[in-house]
Amino acid sequence: MSLLGIDRRREEFPSLSAGIHLLSHSLGPMPRGAREAMASYLDRWEAYTRENAWKAAWWDLSAEVGGRIARLLGAAPGSVQPQPNASVALSAAASCLDFSSGTRRKIVTTALEFPTTEYVWREQERTGARLEVVASEDGVTTPMEKLLDAIDEETALVSISHVSYRSSHRLDPGPVVERARRAGALVLLDVYQSAGVLPLEVARWGVDFAVGGTIKWLCGGPACGYLYVHPDLAPDLRPRLTGWIAHEEPFDFAAGPIRYASGARRFAQGTPGVPGLYSCLPGLDILLEVGPETIAAESRRRTQRMVEFALERGWPLRSPSDAADRGGSVMIGAADPEKLEEELARRRVSVDWRPGVIRVSPHFFNTDEEVEEALATLSELL
């Protein structure tokens, strides 16, 4: 369906006919091509005795997926390595750092991160790190001044979300990277809630690491995570979380110690999850064809409509009201969000909830009529 000159590619997502999908912050709809891609995987597996699937397709698949993700991140080719999930990607980055000696042991993060982030960095305290969590005064935004003040000469790493999963608050990476550079610290950017809905420029921003996954805005399902490492930094890193695929010549099956691959594959571990890699390719291709700028413009327009609708009715808004400070989701306060989510689902409107809020996320494939119907339904229930 085309609206305002935008090809929404709705024919590529069969499940959209079953209801209004406003759940891309949690799970994107399955592209039609994912079923075909999985069939291709099974065909190659079944035909293995006639043609070596590793040589014919599987060995290059990680690089193909990483290349597509790099384009969506604004990253250099060959700088993204698929991971089993974002938690492993974060742990792989953590394993590159040494907190056992010296004065540079501090990790700075924020209170609005996904729980995995603090879990991983807290555990680094067992190796000598010291974690500092910058609080959010309103539970919606991270105060930039306090974040910058926390970055000093003892800081080894700053780990922040580009867009918070809790509030959709968007942080500008520029000032953080600038302050970290002056202090001699590295920056890791979690782009899970921004990749696929906002234009990203990780190379231009100068972040050292970026992590995310395909399950949400990238329409890839629970397929894989990914780790970006700045090409100038990567050759100097020796991840302790490793495996045979990270070796420069893995099929030499050489005894240790490992000789790391020269590219992004140095951040791999064991045998890749081939089915997941197949399943996320169609969604990545669709997003690249539609284009990040087009998708972002639609997201700003739709979320702004939702914000204004909520404010006009006096609903508690738990996301930034300014589109420049907001990601692709809108969080609205609710006394019983779980029950509200269930009622919306019964009326064919898919959202989800977190304590105290429901989360609503339009994507490029949604129509204006769907958004208006969902808002009307929400108004009736609230």
Image (cartoon, helix red, strand yellow):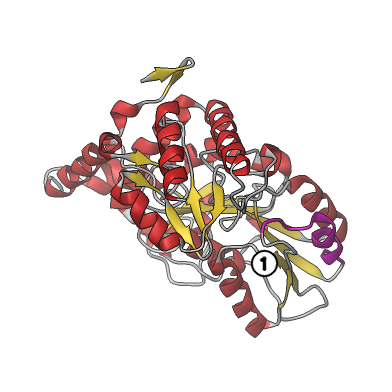
Judge whether residue 73 is colored magenta: no
Residue closest to the eye, 22 or 222: 22
Amino acid type, residue under disc 1 in the picture: Ala
- Residue 258 position (above or below residue 347): below
In the image, residue 142 lies in the stretch drawn in magenta: yes
Residue at the image position 54 percent from the left and 45 percent from the top: 329
Residue under circle 1?
111
Locate residue 29, reporting x and y percent.
34, 42
Closer to us: 171 or 367: 367
Relative to 239, say whether 29 is above or below: above
Q: Position of residue 254 (x, y in %)?
A: 42, 66
Tally the numbered discs. 1
Q: Quadrant of residue 179?
A: bottom right
Q: Position of residue 164 (x, y in %)?
A: 61, 55
Horizontal placement of 15 versus 187: left or right?
left
Say if residue 60 shows up in the picture.
Answer: no
Q: Residue at x 33, y 28 (%)?
A: 10
Whether residue 264 can be seen here: yes
Q: Which residues are magenta?
A: 140-152
| Quadrant (top left, top right, bottom left, bottom right) of the N terminus | top left
Mark 1: few/some/many CA within 10 Å (<14, 14-19, 20+)? many
